[in-house]
Amino acid sequence: MARQNTLELLQTYESRNVTFIADDGSWPIVWKKAKGVHVWDEAGKKYLDLTGAFGVAAAGHANPRVIRAGQKQLSELPHAMGDVHPHRQKGELARALSAITFERWGAGFGKTIFSNSGFEAVESALKTARLATGKSRVIGFEGAYHGLGYGTLNVTHREYFRAAFRDQLREFGTFVKFPTNESELGQTQSSISELLLNDEFSAILVEPIQARGGIIVPHPDFLPLLRQICDHYNLLLIVDEIYTGFGRTGEWFACDHTQTVPDIVCLGKALTGGFPLSACIARAGLMDAWPPSTGEAIHTSTFMGHPVGCAMSIAQIKELKGKKLIAASRQKGKFLLKELSKLASCSDKLKIAARGVGLMAGIELRTLDDQPATQQSLEIIKKLLQRGFIFLPEGEYSNVISFTPPLTITQVQLKSSVAALKDELAGL
């Protein structure tokens, strides 16, 4: 009854574009509480969460260390004045983020702009690139997802998100192929070189692995190639690590796999483990393209660098280090990918392909005539939800079943989730 009441409230009082409610009652569940790798709904049913709540709960849902930090901060100082009267935690977190990014990369120290959500961090990066170069255009990639604000819609590729607002967009983003093999890598390089005959570009913006795009892992030479291009043409390399950051792929950041150092990095999601906070971090000299504050900042917001979020983020970083969760993600990810690869032959009605890095993995479902198996993917995810497993579809056609669980998940839990997925695939 509590679930039905909640859904009725949402149908009555929330924009109908937000929460999808299936007519047959199969979707969604209403979350009541979450702890570790588990979620409980309003009826008390327990679920294994294979989404990490969009990858946010890297150190586990309601991680005790993180929650204690947030509660302590909330009791002492629940709000400060963004760009006017600061608080200590904001400075401490900026220093900690510099240490795990540019200082760890041997590129000096970094300076941060805090925001509330991932798309704001990307828009801070786009503004930084505009100020630093004096140029407005940005090269992005097919399949890219950087958020849905008016700035980020210019660099988010999927037409579904852009179409209704196209006449209000500046259209400063140009998209090229996100390459997964040698041939596509050459095609991408040629496309970028051709674009750069035009001297209006300030930056290249890239996700090191496309999450919402369908867990797309690029060719291993891709990021180093972009770094080389940016150095040659004097462009800025902006890496969107909002989903891939904080150990998700088995390294602190996905760009670490190829030792590629960006000029600007965007962070969010697992930054706090559950509180709205994001960060745009740039090389210090580059961030100094912003003018000093005169008492009126040209980029700010009321909750900028919120004290509760900053306290939780500092605790989250300590927890990831102390529990060695990044190494665990790497090791468990190899196990997961091996298990997922076994699914390739479990259905005679679908083509099944596994891919991923660390605990960001997925299987793509296609029909025998090579069309996206959207209906089958969604049917399986709904059936798995009924069995107590929370999954999400990814990709433009929702035909990729993704795994982005808390990094605290065990191999036994991963194995049981893959076994359940195998059952549903075989039973189609």
Image (cartoon, rainbow, N blue to C red):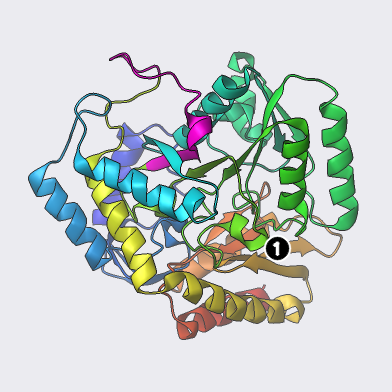
Residue farthest to the left?
75
On whether residue 205 falls in the magenta region, the answer is no
Residue farthest to the bottom?
412
Magenta residues (range): 278-298
Q: Which residue is mark 1?
A: 364
Give the vertical position of 270 relative to 17 (above or below). Answer: below
Residue found at x 59% / y 15%: 168
Give the vertical position of 53 relative to 195 (above or below). Answer: below
Residue 327 x, y percent position in the rendering: 49, 74
Query: Are there few (<14), some (14-19), or many (20+) residues within 10 Å of tag 1?
Result: many
Do we see residue 151 in this rendering? Answer: no
Residue 416 x, y percent position in the rendering: 50, 83
Residue 239 x, y percent position in the rendering: 59, 44
Q: Quadrant of residue 361?
A: bottom right
Residue 67 x, y percent position in the rendering: 22, 59
Residue nearest the observer in this picture, 143 or 128: 128
